[in-house]
Image (spheres, rainbow, N blue to C red):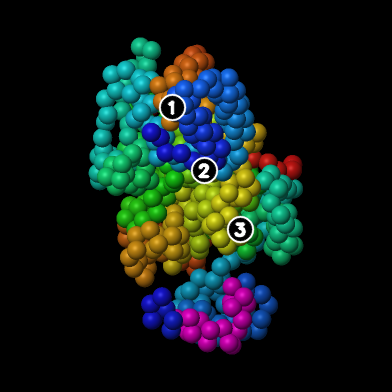
Amino acid sequence: MSKLMAFEEPVVKLREKIDELKTIAVEADVDMSGEIEKLETRLTQLEQSLYANMEPWNRVQVARHPQRPTTLDYIERIFDDFIELHGDRSFKDDEAIVGGIASFNGQPITIIGHQRGKTTKENIRRNFGMPHPEGYRKALRLMQQAEKFKRPIICFIDTKGAYPGKAAEERGQSEAIARNLFEMAGFKVPIISIVIGEGGSGGALALGVANKIFMLENSTYSVISPEGAASILWKDASYAKQAAEAMKITAPDLKQLGVIDGIIPEVAGGAHKNVDQQASTMKEYIVDTLVHLNSLSVEQLIDERYAKYKNIGQFIE
Amino acid sequence: MAIRDLFSINRKKNAGSIIKKSDEKHFPEGIVTKCPKCKTIHVTKEVEKNLKVCPKCVYHFNMTAHERINCFLDKDSFTSMDDHLQTMNPLNFPAYIEKVNSDMEKTGLNEAVLTGVGTLKGNPIAIAVMDSHFRMGSMGSVVGEKITRAVEKATELRIPFIIFTASGGARMQEGVLSLMQMAKTSVALKRHSEAGLLYISIMTHPTTGGVSASFASIGDLNIAEPQSLIGFAGRRVIEQTVREKLPEDFQTAEFLLDHGQLDAIISRLDMRDKIATIVKLHVQGGVSHV
């Protein structure tokens, strides 16, 4: 049973009432099938309208859902022969980022993504998906390897941010992120980045300099968390709901701002409701995008990436 | 709060009783200036003549972008670029444009960075100087665009690109567009680098957040002024997450040098000479192999 979110309450309550009615009907041996049918139609409508008009704060909740599928959930469903590769060759293996090689429709491919844990134990091991510099350096190593063997790179973005800690600063968190932005600009292979959960600031962007960027419908991408923005704007983190709206962090917002190339639709209520179906939708997007990117020359790939970022921003000339 | 913090608050209060704190920071026309570090009171003109470095303890006061250009480049060699770009309000933040306008008036800049071309001991360079007096030097669309255009200019003219960073990070009021300026400047610097051209990053106080995590950290040479605050995450944020006392020199230029993140710390008094030498060593060209 998946965890329910507050905004889903009306649907949940109605479903409970229908179940109750069904039990009563059986117990009292009365025919209420007409009423039950009507209520079920109403439930479907309610679900549709609820999930079709999700407010930014509701999407934040879906993006943070403990059962939301992670990078490894998608890898296992979309790619064949995945082999995880570890370590940055300098310091350690940062499990907040996973990466490796796999086959995708017969084409060898490199996959890298932030990795959250699903249990407390796993989250501690993976530092809640918040990488240290060695995580970004592992990602860079795998990307350089992909370039050498001419493999496209797929990045899954899913992090609250790069870890703000003493050790991270000592080992050059800034440089690790900056280096990835810089090097990703020049790779001679296609890069696709997909935001699957939370895209938190520089720690997310460090896997996000791509030819094409997609966001899952209920994912977020932002310069600061809604709580962080609220505590700066209103000196009170409890205004996160308002900040989520003001900061424009949802997939439709980013599409409108010209930051992302497309929105990958989610199954009603969020990706966690049907992971297999979500993975198969995402796979279609990757297939189509790779067909296009594989047809480009090295120069076109790099120029396209250049033009993409050069065009982001709003100012009066 | 620790007991020693309580005392430090009092210390700050006492220090502020002679000269207002804001005066120390912005350093306007006053006859005397008190060094916030060694507390010596100097004649302001003396300090200015000394490139805003305390003659006694070599504390580096913050500089404005224009002051930096004047003391770094050859006299009258600087031509500015893109002073016409104007900030927009993409997220419709209340009072954002008003704040930008008031900083424009205060600093005489159109945004938190001044860019252009000039010469350094005869060698042409493209330069960007961030100014922390303008919205804390934060980076929004205009800052990102100005830096990117200055890099492109350097690539086009095949000359070195030098930046003086001073920034609190990405500008929150432009949301994710500010974040993306980190990528925009990086793709331009990558192209500059691929052309075999020099990029020197000179970090000044303070260089943090998104600016630290993009162009500031990827120079062919990473240089810093003494005692500058440089880091990714804020000290308070880190203290809250790790719940441990951070060392006194945490995130200073000296700390970064010690941890292998910098090529050198250069005093402002030597900056022009040393950077000119570095540029000279690069524009002379290396060995040409077939």
Residue B269 position in % (x across, y down)? 49, 68
The residue at the point 58 percent across, 26 percent down is: A39
Residue at 53% x, 57% y is: A237
**Label 3 amino acid?**
Leu
Residue A254 in view in this figure: no
**Whether labels 3 and 2 share one chain:** yes
Q: Which mark is residue A221?
A: none
Identify the main secondary structure in magenta: helix
- Image point 38% across, 20% down: which residue? A78
Q: Amino acid at mark 1?
A: Glu
Which chain does the numbered disc 3 sit on?
A: A
Which contiguous range is marked in magenta? Answer: B8-25
Q: Which residue is mark 3?
A: A233
Quarter of image, res A260 = top right
Residue A315 in magenta stretch: no
Circles 1 and 3 in contact, beta carbons < 8 Å: no
